[in-house]
Amino acid sequence: MDLFRQSIEQPDNLLPKDGVVKYYGELVSLASADDYFNRLLTAIEWKNDEAVIYGKRIITKRKVAWYADHAFEYTYSNITKRALPWTSELLELKTLVEQKTGEHFNACLLNLYHDGSEGMAWHSDGEKDLKRNGAIASLSFGAERKFAFKHKASKETLALVLEHGSLLVMQGTTQTYWQHRLPPTKKVTEPRINLTFRTIVNDNNTTPSNTKREPPLDGHDIQQIQSDLGRSLTVRHPM
Ligand SMILES: O=C(O)CCC(=O)C(=O)O
Ligand SMILES: [Fe+2]
């Protein structure tokens, strides 16, 4: 019976080809989503995202944090940080997401967008330290924001709105063939918190620091990059 109920609850794939994106809608009640938003705002060690692009140090307005099973080190354009141990709210949410999706995750990257002026440029989350074709589960709290996908070859795009307390999952070859972005918008004046649960592969296969990729520029000027930086990470495992 449970199996049947789970299978009818699975949302349709939103992508027409080359990957799987499922939008589950609200994972928790409105009251619970409000509560998680407030708890995450205070419990998470938010830091402005940093990068070195063309030798220039960029500090983003957007804030980020990384939590994981282990104290993974990760390098973002020559700046090395270490993952923090799970907080109680992150563990609760990880369990909820794992139950819903049937997937397992060992790390979470968090983003805090203060308002619609902050977003994230086109990118895919295909870093070599992430499990190949592993699922990425994205939880949203706070302001509703548009989220878009673009096929790398055909350039076809699609977009949806990520609601307060909602879950979106990217699976299979999505990161290979599609990019995604959170477009900046003047319409949104409220903050949004996003959690992306991921699986880091624990194989000690580290990327030498001189081969780090830069976050995508996408024709944005520096001013835009400060609020709109894409994601590109390499990960080093704990000693
Ligand atoms: O904020 C979002 O919904 C997307 C974040 C994202 O794509 C990322 O952290 O890689
Ligand atoms: Fe992403």
Image (cartoon, rainbow, N blue to C red):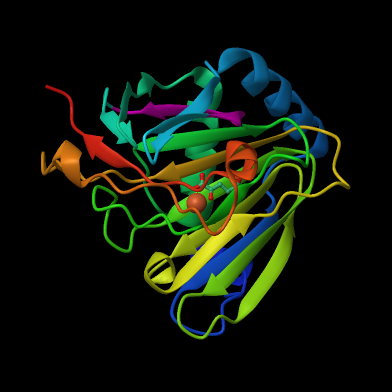
Residue drawn at x 25%, y 44% as measured from the top left: 212
Q: Position of residue 29 (x, y in %)?
A: 77, 39
Q: Position of residue 237 (x, y in %)?
A: 18, 31
Q: Nearer the viewer, residue 233 or 174?
A: 233
Corner quadrant of residue 161:
bottom right
Asked whether residue 1 appears in the rendered view, the answer is no
* Labels in figure, total: 0
Q: Nearer the viewer, residue 43 or 82?
A: 82
The verdict on residue 66 being magenta is: yes
Say whether residue 118 is left or right of residue 31. Answer: left
Of the 4 image quadrants, the one containing the C terminus is top left
Asked whether residue 228 appears in the rendered view, the answer is yes
Q: Main secondary structure of the magenta part?
A: strand
Say whether residue 166 is left or right of residue 149. Answer: right
Say whether residue 46 is left or right of residue 215. Answer: right
The verdict on residue 181 being magenta is: no
Residue drawn at x 80%, y 49% as measured from the top left: 185
Span highlighted in magenta in the image = 59-69
Corner quadrant of residue 115:
top right
Residue drawn at x 48%, y 70% as measured from the top left: 178
Q: Position of residue 126 (x, y in %)?
A: 35, 57
Q: Position of residue 215 (x, y in %)?
A: 43, 47
Image position of 196 with respect to 126: above or below: above
Of the 4 image quadrants, the one containing the N terminus is bottom right
Corner quadrant of residue 66:
top left
Residue drawn at x 55%, y 18% as measured from the top left: 44
Image position of 6 with respect to 44: above or below: below
Image position of 70 with respect to 2: above or below: above
